Image (spheres, rainbow, N blue to C red):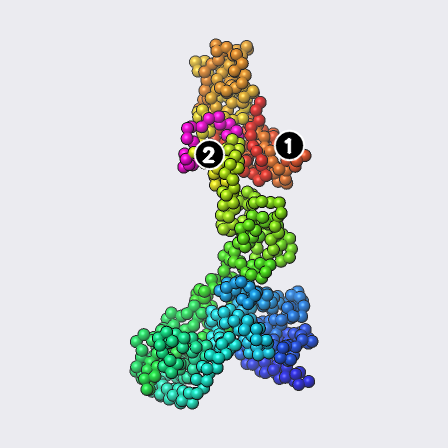
Amino acid sequence: MVATENVAAELQNLIEILESYLPAERINELLLAFDFANQAHQNQKRKSGELYITHPLAVAHLLANIKMDSQTIAASLLHDVIEDCGISVNLLKEKFGNDIANLVEGATKIEKIPSISNAQTDAETLRKMFLAMAKDVRVIIIKLADRLHNMRTLEYLSQDRQMAIAQETREIYAPLASSLGITQIQWELEDLSFRYLDPHEYARIAKNLDSKRSERERYVRKLENQLIEALNVAEIQCDVEGRAKHLFSIFQKEQRYKHELKSFDEIHDLLALRVIVNSVSDCYATLGIIHQTWKPVPTGFDDYIASPKESLYQSLHTSVYGPGQRLFEIQIRTSEMHEIAEYGVAAHWQYKSNLSHRDYRYEERMSWLRRLIEWQQEGTEDFLESIKTDVFVDQVFVHTPKGDVLILPQGSTSIDFAYRIHTDLGHSCAGAKINGKLVPLTTIIESGDSIEIIRSRTIKGPSRDWLIPSLGYLGSNHSRQKIRQWFRRQQRDENVDRGKELFDREMRRLAINKLPPKFWQKFKLESQSELYLRLGSGDISSEHLGLILSEYSKPGNTNVSSSLVRLGDNVNVRILGSTGLHIDLGKCCNPLPGDPIIGFVTRSGGVTVHRNTCNNLARGVANERLLECDWSMNTGVYSARIQVVAWDRIGLLRDISTILANGDANMIGVSTDERKDRTTIVNLTVETEGGAKFVNLLSALDGVRGVISVQRIQG
């Protein structure tokens, strides 16, 4: 009964704070969220013995104190119902809308990020992952308030848990609060962490401060009165308050002073005055009066109004020597600047005038979160709802099965993930599970995914297909380098043999019988065997080789051959010393414009043109029946017969047709023959001008996915 009364009192306290800045209908909506959370947590208690609902209620109270919007307050009341109560996201969307449900889901995802106590991950990586996982900056603010209340009640946990949570708070949550400019939360998180991580030092500094508290308070009041009097004379309205630095910052300063051989008693700048004025002009006027009142330290001035910090912080800082030559700091700012200094990003909701101007400044200054804001004007009350984060757009943060966090380039796949863990794991990768489900190896991974790699017991290395960009297996250059290294490390003889096979295939495909001496120098290599090695290891692609070889396919070049036969009577061949003869192309060797040719006089008086190397001409043909001939410069249209051997798949003929169309070739005939080994033979008849265009067409066909070989059909 007492516990229930305490909850009711805390709820009433929260309502009173909310009534200071939210309309009644919003508060009624928040009461519905509280009732839902209270029902979900009804059988749960905290380690302290309190009802669990006191925790989300306290988190909401912290956020109400910094005047967060109603959706954030609602999400803070509900932030543990998914993780601890088994409530589904869909149910939250149904009852409270997509925005609140997404905030709760975002907070739940961050809760699952491994802590530095159980993951081999540095703090900076985890901080980045927090930001990348939070699509809405309000998720981070909820988690900061959640952590602050947990730190305030840390005494009920075991010492090991206290140390682990305090360490994580110091390294993750306090820097996040600092980055967002919420110094009020940052300082308390730092002090609470300090209390548990180094209790002896914490107690010593607290005792030293307490022993001189009355003296310090008298000195501060003297400074306040002196400054207020000077500003009243100048007719500057102001609020002046003194403050002591928080304990952890004093400890850090003390550590720095030790290197200068100074003691705690010699730290004079433990005090600071804060002056709140009405305008920026008053800030600079106040600075001048302060320097007239006390002697300034020449190097102790910073203008964060003209040059704000990345967290949006603005203020004038100056250090001066007060009575007794005691050094102290004074901060001068407007009320608006003060709210931003205390609450950072969270303070922006409060400003209901000139929103577009403030939004512009906010977007410009948050350079530490690249393009943090995609704002739109949806009314003053819902201002924070438009502040979205799209941070670290070039990176994704994913989990290993052990809970470690890896950073990969955006667009990476499971194979990239495998290579980032270990090169051997990448080489033997045969499958992957993302978030427990089997997925194709080409699946793009996203931040927050948990990835498990399935090893192959038979595969001894990567597939060459992984290096083909169009197939989408890789998104990381790191992986490509590892795969290329693997192929380079294979036995030299194996790569040389494979390279020779690739080289010979290109020669056959292009029907090239002879190359100039030291052809390998075209690739800036030292020998033919090195060319084979580079081909076999993948350093030189067959496409690149084909491109170099195609230089020898120009009309008139004696090293170029083809599979073309004549279409029609105009074959564009000149018989030297003769005119008016009927000319046919020999179907036994199918010469192409550019081939070395010779004419053979038939019994009917016509001429059949053969390639010089045609086997039929070598069978005792009388020399008097041979005529010298060459190709004329006029272009003609020829038909070519091509045979493509490929793995059978859907879309093969479509891709082949696209290649032909792009190569200005018209397909006038096609037939296919399927084999039992799941390959298919595609016989094509195409119209083309021949020469280099035909050579390039063959190269393009050879690059179609699944194609094993491309060659001309003789005869």
**Which range of residues does the magenta coloring cover?**
507-526
Q: Name the residue under label 1.
A: 672
Instruction: Kindly identify the amino acid type of the residue bearing the numbered disc 2.
Output: Ser
Q: In this view, does 83 lie above or below 468?
A: below
| Camera-side residue of 595 and 19 | 595
Q: Could you tell me residue 437's position as x and y percent?
A: 65, 55
Q: Per the image, is 488 magenta? A: no
The residue nearer to you, when weighing 317 against 149, is 149
- Mark 2 Cα shell of 10 Å, populated few (<14), some (14-19), many (≥20): some
- Residue at image coords 48%, 70%: 175
The residue under label 2 is: 529
Q: What secondary structure is marked by label 2?
A: helix
Distance from disc 1 to disc 2, alpha carbons, whole Å, reads 38 Å
Q: Are marks 1 and 2 in contact (CB under 8 Å)?
A: no
Q: Nearest the camera: 572 or 220?
A: 220
Q: Is residue 589 visible?
A: yes
**Vertical relation: 296 (above or below) 363:** below
Q: In which quarter of the image is the C terminus?
A: top right
Pinpoint residue 286: horizontal percent, then vertical percent. 35, 80
- Image: 179 above or below 588: below
- Asked whether 516 falls inside the magenta stretch, the response is yes
Three-letter amino acid code of the residue under disc 1: Thr
